[in-house]
Amino acid sequence: MVWRSVIAGMIAVLLAVWSLPASAQVRLKDLVEFDGVRGNELVGYGLVVGLNGTGDGVRNSPFTEEIMATLLERLGVNVTGEQFRPRNVAAVIATATLPPFARAGARIDVSVSAIGDASSLHGGTLVMTPLNGADGQIYAVAQGSIVSGGVSIRGQAAEEVRGVPTSGTVPLGARVEREVDFVLSSLRSVRLALRQPDFSTAASIERVINAQLGRGIATMLDAGTVELDVARAGGGSTAHLLSRIENLTVAPQSRARVVLDQRSGTVVIGADVRISDVAVAQGGLSLRVEETPLVVQPNPFGEGETVVVPRTAVAIEDRDQVALAELRGGTSLSEIVEGLTALGVGPRDLIELLSSIHAAGALHAELIVR
């Protein structure tokens, strides 16, 4: 009964999806990436201070001692030859993404993660940490209080951890110090890269842009690229041209897909999925074990002890009659789910059956198993 209620809920969700228009219009900015308009990844190695005894054990994390000594010497404190074992500091890796067109002085978010044996970064402060790009240059400097969503509580004989206390964020914690050299106005052509390459979608983008700006402005190069001729478009700079087309709507096309997540038992079937003639049978063994222990007590005022006598009932039921369903060629998504649900198939059994149908060559879709 539980599985049937789960199946009923899944069908309700899928029916809601089927009721949506098959050719929904999507903005161009949600389908493509503009060539050159991209972020850049930054990374840095820093120190978090102010922890309440949850920092690195310096004996187990010697790199924490090295960076702490370097920091103190830069501040004029000589610690050469000294031995200190603080538990309120932790070495971390700081990461951030430099957005496109970020200018010097702008602030960006920073993520920090412990790399030593610190148990929590809660309440700590990230000390001035340079963030480097792939070219080794410093593009931002991070510093500020860490916001951690995890929490760790420890006693003498027990410990409770919720979330991930060894990572956190510093909102707007980094200031941009160097800009990426990129002049959008110098481009004579701009390429639009589709996030999901498809020839039909690329052709639709080309057709919609040319209808808006003029014939020959957009040219489809392949399934994932459409090129714009900026000089031929006229009417302002490259930025003006992109602003004119990014809100144009297109009906994207995609391949038929079936996604199976074995860990959660989730099945997602695309609306364009079709199958050929195939018969599906379901049967198997049903095993049941019942424990009904019997308590035997001595007579009142008599000698003896209470005894628990185990009683176990084991039964194996072999279903001689298997459930059988026949799915005709060209069967749609709704008919597939309805037919398999009629067999009392649970989500995890549905995953196995769809995999078997695909192996038989009757499921005409891309099968993605996670």
Image (spheres, helix red, strand yellow):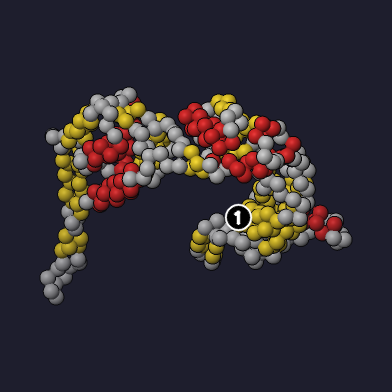
Residue at 37% from the left image edge and 37% from the top image edge: 270
Q: Classify residue 247 as left or right of residue 300.
A: right
Residue at 23% from the left image edge and 37% from the top image edge: 339
Relative to 104, say whether 218 is above or below: above
Residue at 42% from the left image edge and 31% from the top image edge: 255
Q: Quadrant of residue 361?
A: top left
Q: Which residue is mark 1?
A: 167
Give how far across and how far down residue 69 sits, in percent.
80, 56
Q: Classify residue 338 as left or right of residue 187.
A: left
Task: Using the image as rendered, state which of residue 237 and residue 32 is in the foreground.
Answer: 237
Task: Give the residue at the far bottom of this rendering.
Answer: 301
Give how far across and how far down residue 133 sits, in percent.
73, 43
Q: Amino acid at mark 1?
A: Ser
| Element on which disc 1 rests | strand
Disc 1: CA contacts within 10 A as few (<14), some (14-19) or many (>=20) = many
Locate the C terminus and report the quarter of the image it occupies: top left
